[in-house]
Image: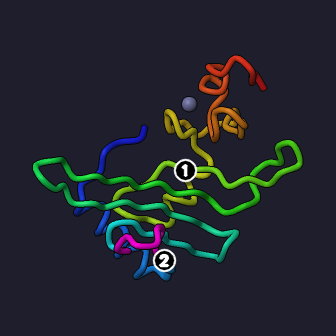
Amino acid sequence: MQRRYTLQEVQDWRQAAIDAGWAKSPIYDGEDIERAMYLRKGGEDGWLAHTIARPGEDGLPDMTSLAVYAPLGEPMARGMLVKLGVLVPVPFCEAKLEENTKRCQQCGVADETVGYSPYAGRTCRQHRSAWPLDNS
Ligand SMILES: [Zn+2]
C-alpha cells in the first residue's frame, strides 16, 4: 500500500511530526536536511521516519518518500529485536501510527493473523504465505 506522496504532503507530514516533538536530523552528509530528513521520537530505539522531498530538476518529477518504522521490540526473530515499517497515515497522526503497528503493511487488515515475517515484514497470514520460505 505504498503510494507516491507530493512534496507538500511530505513537508506537511514532517512539520506535524516536529510539532509533536519528533527530532529531525539529516540523512546524508552533504544533502540539505529539507531534502532528506530523519525524524525520531523516543530515541534510537523509538519511532523512526525516513523522509525524502527532492524537488524535480530539469523537467524530472519530484522525488518523494515517506517510510516509518515502529519502535524496537517487535516479536523476536532469530534472537533479534527488529524495527518494522508501518503504514504511514497522511496527514501525520500519532494515534494512527500506533494503530498501524497492528495492521498488515500490504493490505491494512488488522486481525489475529498479523505478525512478523523476516521476509515479508509486518503482514497478515495471506501476505506472509506469498513468501515460499515462510509459511508461519
Ligand atoms: Zn495482508
Q: Residue at x 35, y 57 (%)?
A: 90
First in sequence, mark 2 or 1: give its number.
Answer: 2
- Along the line of sight, which residue is nearer the eye, 115 or 95? 115
Q: What range is drawn magenta here?
A: 24-33
| Helix, strand or loop for disc 2 | strand
Q: Can you tell which quarter of the image residue 12 is in?
A: bottom left
- Along the line of sight, which residue is nearer the eye, 30 or 64? 30
Looking at the image, residue 118 sits to the left or right of residue 59; the answer is right
| Helix, strand or loop for disc 1 | strand
Q: Can you tell which quarter of the image residue 32 is in?
A: bottom left
Q: Position of residue 102 (x, y in %)?
A: 62, 47
Residue picked out by circle 2: 25
Q: Quadrant of the N terminus?
A: top left
Q: Position of residue 110 (x, y in %)?
A: 58, 40
Q: Can you tell which quarter of the image residue 40 is in?
A: bottom right
Amino acid carrying mark 2 in the image: Ser
- Which is more foreground, mark 2 or mark 1? 2
The tally of labels here is 2
Looking at the image, residue 31 sits to the left or right of residue 82; the answer is left
Looking at the image, residue 93 sits to the left or right of residue 43; the answer is left
Q: Does the stretch in magenta take in 65? A: no
Q: Position of residue 128 (x, y in %)?
A: 66, 27
Residue picked out by circle 1: 86
Amino acid carrying mark 1 in the image: Val
